Amino acid sequence: MHTASPPAAATALVIGGGVAGMSAALSLSEAGTRVHLIDSDPDWKVYGAGITITGPTLRVMRRLGILDRVLAEGWTADGLLVCDAQGAVISEISTSAQALQGLPGAGGIMRPTLHRLLAERVRARDITVTLGVSVTSLEPGAPVRVTFSDGQEGSYDIAVGADGIFSQTREMLFPGFGGPRYVGQICWRLMTARHPSITRRTYFLGGPMKVGMNPVSPDEMYMFLLEPRAEPERLADAELPDRLAQLMAPYGGIIAEVRDGLGPDSRIVVRPLETIVLPDPWHCDGVVLIGDASHATTPQLASGAGMAMEDGVVLGECIAAAPDIGSALDAFMARRYDRCRLVVENSLRLGQLERTGATPLEQIHVVERALERLNEAY
Ligand SMILES: Cc1cc2nc3c(=O)[nH]c(=O)nc-3n(C[C@H](O)[C@H](O)[C@H](O)COP(=O)(O)OP(=O)(O)OC[C@H]3O[C@@H](n4cnc5c(N)ncnc54)[C@H](O)[C@@H]3O)c2cc1C
């Protein structure tokens, strides 16, 4: 559906085809902008971990036209169950809200599934996709001029840096700002068969670490475990199952059952948790940074991908509504900065509470307040 008047940007380059970049490409294309999307990965793939989706994430998925497929291929259920380290239920956090207009308040999906659903939407629109290239020089202005790693050149009304937490676009636009900061926690994720009793987001608090489980389909779930560690450590793949089993040793109930199923073929992904937030504004002379490139969060509120998709949608809406690119990007910042900062700050606060052994109640309180605010319209 095209808008009646021409959009502020006739052409756009989107650098990075993750959830932020694909959402921006779709929303800009819907606004009537001709979009060129590039990704440095020639295979345009994403690693095989599960991802938690919140009610607000489902809301933006509906806006992007992938909700039906997410409901069919992922898993959704209301509520967030909080258990102790032995699996006894302590409390339940409500995730339903009027602002979500009947959508489930939580869910899960495999990252490659989400990537495929968005990529199919991108491929179905008149969006040019070039894989295996990056930007080697970037000259902000009107137009923005770029040189690509394959030697090609281009000029665009707007360039969107959606190239993730280690964004090269960020380095080119704001040299000297620095990179992400490690927060002292390692995230372990295990993809495994869904335990029959795991039917929704479930946290296990009050043990030495935070552990959670979430279905990603009727057959599969993922477990995450946040290990406090002063410095990140590189482990060989063969070491992962034993090390994870050791970390899970203090736990009983379902966690102990899952631990007993660990073996050399277990699908385990380990990542250090890092964060970065750029100050307002995230744009300069026609180049804007979105998603993890401008606000990478730790995963405690399970909202990083949701915020990245919202960024993309809002960017297209602002380009469609504003008279020129500068005012569109100012309007974008007015809608995005506080909301994205809220996610990062509350996630970091939760990480701190986890590392200092705060009571489950203190942690639940922060989650509830943040979810309430995130349910509000973006
Ligand atoms: C351990 C962990 C768990 C998480 N769990 C959740 C969760 O449960 N729920 C949730 O909502 N969020 C979660 N997140 C956050 C979420 O993963 C990110 O916020 C989200 O992936 C950001 O999307 P993005 O598109 O900005 O960046 P990315 O997903 O990193 O995508 C960047 C894209 O840019 C491409 N690229 C990189 N460099 C270049 C370049 N120079 N040129 C061209 N292309 C380039 C990459 O190939 C990639 O396709 C988690 C994060 C972590 C670290």
Image (cartoon, helix red, strand yellow):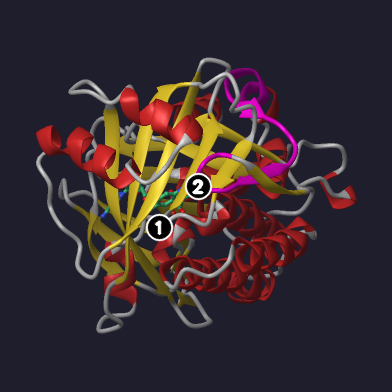
Q: Position of residue 181 (x, y in %)?
A: 31, 73
Numbered marks: total: 2
Can I make out residue 28 in this image? Answer: yes
| Whether residue 296 is situated above or below residue 260 in the rendered picture | below
The part of the chain drawn in magenta is 69-87
Toward the viewer: 293 or 203?
203
Taking the image as shown, residue 335 lies to the left or right of residue 16, namely: right
**Residue beneath disc 2:** 85
Q: Secondary structure at mark 2?
A: loop
Check disc 1: other Cα within 10 Å, few if <14, some if 14-19, many if 20+: some
| Residue underneath mark 1 | 208
Query: Which quadrant holds the C terminus?
Result: bottom right
Mark closest to the chain's N terminus, 1 or 2: 2
Q: Amino acid at mark 2?
A: Ala
Comparing 368 with 122, the one in front is: 368
CB atoms of marks 1 and 2 within 8 Å: yes
> 263 above or below 155?
above
Kind of residue sitting beneath label 1: Pro
